[in-house]
Amino acid sequence: MFKQSITHYKMKCIFNWSGGKDSALALYHCLQNPDLEIKYLVTTVNDAVDRISMHGVRTELLVKQAESIGIPLYQIRLPEMPGMKEYDEVMHHHLSQLKKEGITHSIFGDIFLQDLKDYRDMRLSEVGLTGIYPLWKRDTHELINEFLNIGFSTVIACTQARLEHIVGKELSHELIEALPDDVDVCGENGEFHTFTFKGPIFSKEINYKTGIKVFKEYQAPKNADDSCASTTSQKTSGFWYCDLVLV
């Protein structure tokens, strides 16, 4: 008598990796889902300065993250300030290429920005991909507490101008409690961005030291790349960056 073999088909996915806390927590949950097979960590990189788009983290730290996680890194190189048309064309090209490799789903760490999710879903549908959002509509206080309580550690790499005092600091329960009332504790409105260097998804900690702090001011956002920033237009916006250096 023959025993029937049952094959479990997994969804082949790319994971949109920013290097920050929301990405790390979303990936943590995805790696526990037997229905998902994550083929690549996909990150957009500012080619002019060789740093993660928006977050400003050096690419060598990004590479160390991917090595420690054990998933191949797929870098999408962008000019320093791409327009929406240029950004969409580049992303469409890469997503189409990934679709040819059998990718069917694209995973994001977005939490509650509906306009950004709608934009992502529209662009994915153009190439026949489907979005997955493991953290969608979860309470951000609950998320940040879970992130810290399960052993993740992250450092604030970039903040809005008014939050200069926290850039370069490691996120903690105490720091979260001290944030202004109008700041989302996950920085989902673009208040701050992070680099995660330790936690259950990593085989080893990424060692870094803090470098200089710089302030940069930008014109209205020209793309919807960042998972923590709304697509709504702004006139100008200033950000503090703390350089993180691999040691």
Image (cartoon, rainbow, N blue to C red):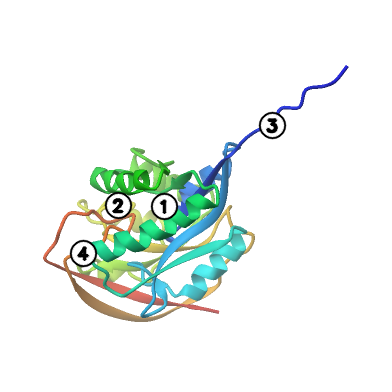
What amino acid is labelled 2 in the image? Glu
Q: Is residue 148 left or right of residue 37?
A: left
Question: Disc 3 and disc 4: Cα gap in Å?
Answer: 46 Å
**Which is more N-terminal, label 2 or label 1?**
1
Q: Residue furthest right?
A: 1
Please tell me whether mark 3 or mark 4 is closer to you in this view.
3
* Cβ atoms at labels 1 and 2 below 8 Å apart: yes
Packing grade of label 1 (10 A; few <14, some 14-19, many >=20) is many
* Cβ atoms at labels 1 and 3 below 8 Å apart: no
Q: Is residue 91 above or below residue 138?
A: below
Q: SS at mark 2? A: loop
Instruction: Give residue 158's position: percent from left, percent from top.
Output: 32, 68
Q: Is residue 46 above or below residue 8?
A: below
**Which is more N-terminal, label 3 or label 1?**
3
**Which is more N-terminal, label 2 or label 3?**
3
Q: Residue furthest left?
A: 235
Question: Disc 4 and disc 1: Cα gap in Å?
Answer: 21 Å
Please tell me whether mark 3 or mark 2 is closer to you in this view.
3
Instruction: Give residue 92's position: percent from left, percent from top.
Output: 37, 56
Query: Which residue is identified by label 3?
Result: 7
Of residues 165 and 121, the one nearer the viewer is 121
Query: Which residue is identified by label 1?
Result: 22
Q: How many marks?
A: 4
What amino acid is labelled 4 in the image? Pro
Query: Which residue is identified by label 4?
Result: 221
Of residues 32 and 95, the one nearer the viewer is 95
Q: Which mark is residue 55?
A: none
Q: Residue at position x 11%, y 65% from top? A: 235
What amino acid is labelled 1 in the image? Asp
Query: Which residue is identified by label 2?
Result: 188
Q: Residue at position x 36%, y 63% from top? A: 90
Instruction: Give residue 163's position: percent from left, percent from top.
Output: 25, 66
